Image (cartoon, rainbow, N blue to C red):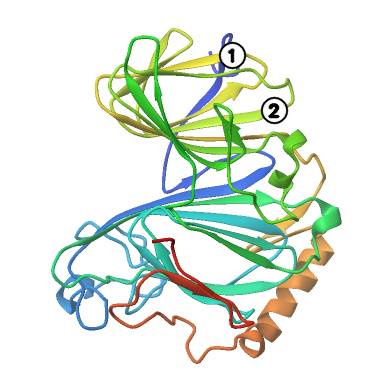
Amino acid sequence: MFGRKRTGPVIKTQFLRLHWDTEDPFVFASHHADDYPKGNAQQAPPLSEIGGRNLGRDYSKVFGFRMYHGKVVPGFPMHAHWGYETVTIPEKGFIDHFDSLGNQGRYGFGDIQWVSAGSMYLHDEMYPLAYDDRPNPNDITQIMINLPLKDKGSDPAVNMMWSEDVPLIGGIDRNGRNYSVKIIAGSFGGTDALPPNEVSWAADKEHHVRILLIRMSSHSEILFPKVSSSLGRNLYFIEGSTVCIGGREYETSQRFKLNGNEDVTVVNGDLDGTYWLLEGEPIGERMSSFGPVILDSDKSVRDAMNHVRKEEFNKWPWDLIDKFHPKGTNRFIRFSDGREEIPPL
């Protein structure tokens, strides 16, 4: 019956859409998977495939892809963040990035961008179709983590983690089957993730924040040991056939709210499976939110939204709000102070 409390490790299930429900300390997550075609000279889809769309707000998957808020190159032109963090992981495809601090870059194919926006921060995130000799599929997951009240108002910070440096460990279960775990936050199997920004809720190990990307071969299994009764633990099954948790079988494309105070064994089904694990101790503070702002009260949010409307174009240092890099650009980040980083050779 609806409302009956479940027994066992699975507390709640929910089918997934483009945007995923989360729980404290996470506030939002989305998964963008689009089959973009070959790019033209503007790193954009051909006109024949974008005609008739509601350009500027295109969330209909026509010809296998969406333009989102882009009108030439797909993606998200200048927009604000205020009061939380954004962890962006493009497993496939590139993201071109410009922000109100004066930073710019191109990253993709397993890189991680970690943005802590305690105060008003503006950036654009465009998805260039960089290749003109083959399709440009993307697979981009974006995870937003709240900040405690004491850190709202802190200066924005941007951190780039190149895929070559991100811990990726392989495992073999008791039956000799394989799995791999990409450690984006927290730790797994005795291996720690790269450090997040200092202001992050994930920076304190006592908060038990973990973000893991897990790939499992058919019929392999993985164990998530118990942590605490207050831990929020959610598993997102995004690709595969079925999964068995607590002796019960479930279909793909589901979110599982799991008991954080219980050992949980996940057994993958017949096909290779892909999962995301998001877990952490809740911040547990009352907050208010609207649009791109999460602060302490409704009044603070209204004041912040008014400030964004009045100042966003004054604070934007670039000539375009949907700016992207020239064709042929490789992965890099250039900070406002002139420092430049590229992936390790």
Q: Nearer the viewer, mark 1 or mark 2?
A: 1
Q: Who's the residue at 40% across and 79% down the image? A: 324
The residue to which callout 2 is attached is: 231
Q: Position of residue 312 (x, y in %)?
A: 64, 82
Amino acid type at mark 2: Leu
The residue to which callout 1 is attached is: 263
Q: Who's the residue at 44% across and 80% down the image? A: 322
Q: Position of residue 260 (x, y in %)?
A: 65, 22
* Mark 1–mark 2 distance (CA, rounded to whole Å): 13 Å
Name the element at disc 1.
loop
Count residues near mark 1 (Cα–Cα under 10 Å), then give few for <14, some for 14-19, many for 20+.
some
Q: Residue furthest right?
A: 150
Q: Nearer the viewer, residue 272 or 21?
A: 272
Q: Earlier in the sequence, mark 1 or mark 2?
A: 2
Amino acid type at mark 1: Asp
Count residues near mark 2 (Cα–Cα under 10 Å), then give few for <14, some for 14-19, many for 20+.
many
Is residue 56 shown above or below 32?
below
Q: Nearer the viewer, residue 87 or 11?
A: 87
Q: Who's the residue at 26% across and 82% down the image? A: 42
Q: Position of residue 13 (x, y in %)?
A: 49, 26
Relative horizontal placement of residue 62, taking residue 56 as reference (left or right) = left
Relative horizontal placement of residue 56, taking residue 287 as reference (left or right) = left
Classify the position of the C terminus by image quarter. Answer: bottom left
Determine if residue 78 is in view: no
